[in-house]
Image (cartoon, helix red, strand yellow):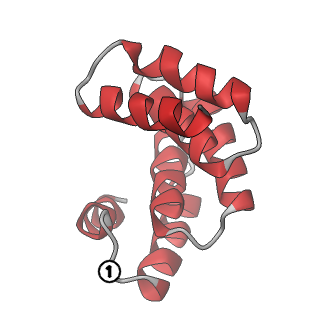
Amino acid sequence: MRLALNNLAALYQQQKDPRARATAEKAYKLSPKDAATQDTLGWILLEQGQSARGLQLIRSAVSVQPNIPTLRYHLAVALAQTGSKTQARAELEKLLAKSPVFPEASAAKILLNSL
């Protein structure tokens, strides 16, 4: 159930559907220690301007699954949005050195160049 809700929340998010957050919150309540649900909810919150809570959730996701490039990219974005540009830069440099090819690599390079 958690996986289905999390996937649905991610799809809603891609479609800019307002049900994304509520669906992600349900998935998170079912499995609050799961990195995927933490990341999905955190990413949605970042997009909705709730950067502090989004950063907290994404940090937690990275602590659970530190080797997933997408999670590390989301962490860098969250750090940049909350004003921690030096930390965001360091995160992106480390990420791109270790994982030069991942779905968000081009976005990561653009973000790095903007910091």
Say if 111 sits above or below 80 in the image. Answer: below
- Give the residue at the far front of this rendering: 1
The residue at 66%/30% (across/down) is 28
Horizontal arrangement in the rendering, residue 8 relative to residue 28 (left or right): left
Horizontal arrangement in the rendering, residue 96 relative to residue 78 (left or right): left
Pinpoint residue 58: horizontal percent, then vertical percent. 61, 46
Q: Between residue 36 and residue 50, name the one nearer to us.
A: 36
Pinpoint residue 48: horizontal percent, then vertical percent. 42, 22
Give, as a three-letter code, the residue at label 1: Val
The residue at 37%/59% (across/down) is 115
Tally of numbered discs:
1
Horizontal arrangement in the rendering, residue 22 relative to residue 112 (left or right): right
Horizontal arrangement in the rendering, residue 57 relative to residue 92 (left or right): right
Say if 114 sits above or below 67 in the image. Answer: above
Residue labelled with disc 1: 101
Residue 62 falls in image quadrant: bottom right
The residue at 45%/23% (across/down) is 49
Pinpoint residue 13: horizontal percent, then vertical percent. 34, 29
Pinpoint residue 64: horizontal percent, then vertical percent. 73, 59
Local packing at callout 1 (Cα closer than 10 Å; few below 14, some 14-19, many 20+) is few
Residue 68 visible to an observer of this rendering: yes
Residue 52 falls in image quadrant: top right
- Give the residue at the far bottom of this rendering: 97
Residue 41 falls in image quadrant: top right
Helix, strand or loop at label 1? It is: loop
Of the 4 image quadrants, the one containing the N terminus is top right
The residue at 52%/58% (across/down) is 71
Residue 46 visible to an observer of this rendering: no
